[in-house]
Amino acid sequence: SQELEQSPQSLIVQEGKNLTINCTSSKTLYGLYWYKQKYGEGLIFLMMLQKGGEEKSHEKITAKLDEKKQQSSLHITASQPSHAGIYLCGADILPGTYKYIFGTGTRLKVLA
Amino acid sequence: GAGVSQSPSNKVTEKGKDVELRCDPISGHTALYWYRQSLGQGLEFLIYFQGNSAPDKSGLPSDRFSAERTGGSVSTLTIQRTQQEDSAVYLCASSSFRPYEQYFGPGTRLTVT
């Protein structure tokens, strides 16, 4: 079955540094979603990407979907302690089915 | 408006007991999902409901797990004869037909002792 691979699994950065998280699939993705989860809380939707080459930004977080729609990256600029948490990518692997798969997550810690 | 709510937030139960977990989706959302998140694992799809269609139960790990959605709104996930490996956070999410992004509840942390 198709899987989403995230890298790195965990990341510790100094406050103010930039960082990138990757999400890769072996098959075409019809929708790619980024979520953030804080410990003990539910997932918060960040962004959705659907078109090859698409890029979206929200505050200091930018997400891109490559032209082949098989890889997405999440980039945080000038990281802050508030960015800490688990970042999950999810994908709609079959259009219109509403059935998602998720990556295993990237645990981000930002040192003040 | 109100987001997805789940209850209880925490549940500790003895092995062999049955438990019921509740999810209240966002009003008007036609799709509802249940996921399980075990320590160090990603989200595991369990079941989803879409409108009045038959639910997709392909992710349920055993016949001890079942779920219902009454009136196209509230859903209950039932685990019978709980086992220690059932310990996890159970997340519920809902989405509208368009856009496709899901809105998650805070989860129910289930601990089976």
Image: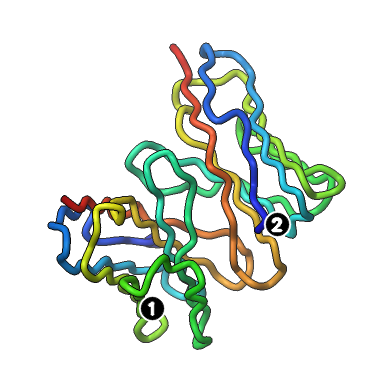
Circle 2: residue type? Gly
Task: Give the x, y percent position of residue A72.
Answer: 72, 41
Q: In this view of the protein, which residue sits in the foreground, B103 or B34?
A: B34
Q: In this view of the protein, which residue sits in the foreground, B29 or A73?
A: A73
* Image quarter of residue A101: bottom right
**Residue drawn at point x = 60 percent, y = 14 percent:** A17
* Disc nearest the viewer among 1 and 2: 2
**Residue drawn at point x = 51 percent, y = 72 percent:** B58
Q: In this view of the protein, which residue sits in the foreground, A81 or B11?
A: B11
Chain containing mark 2 = A
Residue designated by label 1: B73
Say above or below: B70 vs B8. below
Badge 1, how many Cα within 10 Å: few under 14, some, many 20+? many
Task: Give the x, y percent position of residue A23.
Answer: 67, 40
Residue designated by label 2: A31
Asked which secondary structure carries label 1, the reply is loop
**Residue drawn at point x = 57 percent, y = 51 percent:** A102
Q: Is residue B37 left or right of residue B53?
A: left
**Residue drawn at point x = 58 percent, y = 45 percent:** A103
Say above or below: A91 vs B76. above
- Give the residue at the far left of this rendering: B14
